[in-house]
Image: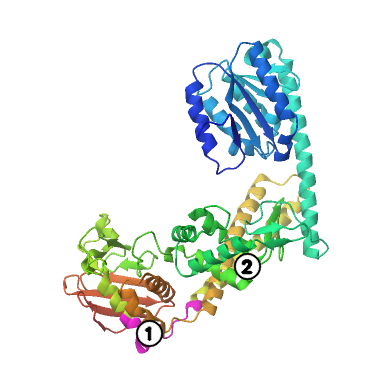
Amino acid sequence: MCSESTVAFGHPSDTTPILCFFFILDRAMSQPRVYSYLRFSDPRQSSGDSSARQAEYARRWAAERGLVLDDALSMRDEGLSAYHQRHVSRGALGVFLAAVDDGHIAAGSVLIVEGLDRLSRAEPIQAQAQLAQIINAGITVVTASDGREYNRESLKAQPMDLVYSLLVMIRAHEESDTKSKRVRAAIRRQCEGWLAGTYRGAVRNGSDPAWVRWTGSAFELIPERAEAIRMAIGLFRQGNGAVRIAREMTARGVSITGGPIGAPALYKTLRVPALMGVKRIEVDGEAYALAGYYPALLTPAEFDELQHLVGQRKRRRGRGEITAMVTGMGITFCGYCGSAVAAQNLMTRPRKADGTPQDGHRRLICNGHSHGAGCDVPGSCSVVPVERAILTYCSDQINLTALMAGSDPAQGLRAALATTRAQIAEVEKQIERVTDAMLADDGPAPIAFARKARDLESQLATLTTEATATERELAHAAGVDAPAAASWAALAEAALAMDEPARQTVRQLVADTFERIAVYARGFTSADRNTIGLVLVAKGGGSRALIVDRRSGAWRAQSDAQL
């Protein structure tokens, strides 16, 4: 794993070089050595002569002083900016500085760089602090471009070298800062041109999605990767979680990125506006949404629906061998204490002849009692009669209609959205008043005013995010009809027979139908060992109470439940 002669960093997920780095450091920390560090903000720069020139300089410098050049730790950061400090946060230099702090680099060692601007182009005070960090650890920094040496002894003898280093850092930062401003201004012009319809070229800001490629005049879909993202979205809509989706895609030999993708990255991918063809860019605090920049995989309505589902990740199927149809979605609670109810599958116990677990080996347990959090009613119950009772009840159209009668899931959302919009309007008025007060004063803005303005802007951003999320949920509620009894009836037998696709679909139906399910594991009286009490609360507030036979799952309905 650590046989290469160069430790090169260029991507945050590339952890193997870091592991190699520390492995080699542990072997070499006992004696002073010479290390070489190269950095290129553009990987294409590494094809020039500077790499070979510095390598030869480092070998000659070490040989003339009788020191060992550690070829195994010739560090390279390609494509990492020193102005934005990515070579520290994601690259080899950051690992080297951490090793210096931890004492893994022996005092008396030497770090050779092309110039001080290779170490940092940050603000001068920060750049000098990084140089001081290395020097104070007893390490000499040598710049190959001019042969200067920086260590505690030389700076004590020649203090003006410290001033010179600061001047170099100031110039490097100013160059990068000026370039950054020009680049940002160019990006802003391109974005404004795109919105005005006068520019249709590429806007080089951030990365592009893995399922498109630039043809020289426009972006086009990469067919196999576009098909992979469509598959991932389809599996997610069916109720699968990211871990299971990634596993299924690997089994089918398809990939969004050309390689394996983890669950966090998959969830992030499902949120990107690029799915509907939009590229979002922020320049100096101003946000641009470039519609039609990429080929769209989803319409805006489909994207909003997907965001609603992503926001309800609890309804996704977990890693367990059996899909839970009533737990793991944040809607099932203990009727006695209000704690969440969890499922427990005793998969190591003897199974039925068909290989499925015994009914009594799949349990519902109150977290409040199992964790000693205050539930006074002991015991658990089998999940099988609960599943059977819910499926049987919802498979009858009369029962389902009665449960959903008067239930309008959008009503509460509309009220919440109205409240949030009113709060947004009030905050905007406060911001306007503070702004007017600041402009009315000819002198510098009082610190209290500036602080108040920042707080109000933060509140406005939070409220705007809440309003957007509610709007998406409202759009989803308006476009999704209440599940019909026929849907439940068609799935009931297969789901109870442990058919996984059917159970996944039922899980989705449960999440779409119910706001809350209260389970009374020992009956409504908490002493009835022959029944289980269920209170089903539909989206929008309709509710029914069921008394369930704990063996057969047969039920009888009471009047509307009063929770």
Residue 141 vs residue 68, the one in the foreground: 68
The residue carrying pointer 1 sits among few (fewer than 14), some (14 to 19) or many (20 or more) residues within 10 Å by Cα, namely many
Q: Where is residue 148 in the image (x, y as percent from the top left)?
A: 72, 17
Which residue is located at x 79 percent, y 56 percent? 190
Helix, strand or loop at label 1? It is helix
Residue 383 vs residue 436, the one in the foreground: 383
Q: Which amino acid does label 2 sit on?
A: Leu
Q: What residue type is labelled 1?
A: Leu
Residue at numbered disc 2 = 297
**Residue 63: quadrant of the picture:** top right
Q: Is residue 404 magenta?
A: yes
Q: Is residue 193 magenta?
A: no
Q: Tell me the tag on residue 137.
A: none
Helix, strand or loop at label 2? It is loop
16 is higher (above) or lower (below) than 537: above
251 is higher (above) or lower (below) than 475: above
Residue at numbered disc 1 = 400
Magenta region: which residues? Answer: 392-411
Q: Position of residue 269 (x, y in %)?
A: 57, 58
Going by the image, does 403 lie left or right of 281?
A: left
Query: From this viewpoint, is residue 20 visible?
Result: yes
Query: From this viewpoint, is residue 142 visible?
Result: no
Sequence-first tag of 1 and 2: 2
Which residue is located at x 70 percent, y 29 percent? 51
Name the mark nearer the viewer: 1 or 2: 2
The CA distance from mark 1 to mark 2 is 36 Å
Q: Where is residue 185 in the image (x, y as percent from the top left)?
A: 79, 50
The residue sitting at the right extreme is 198
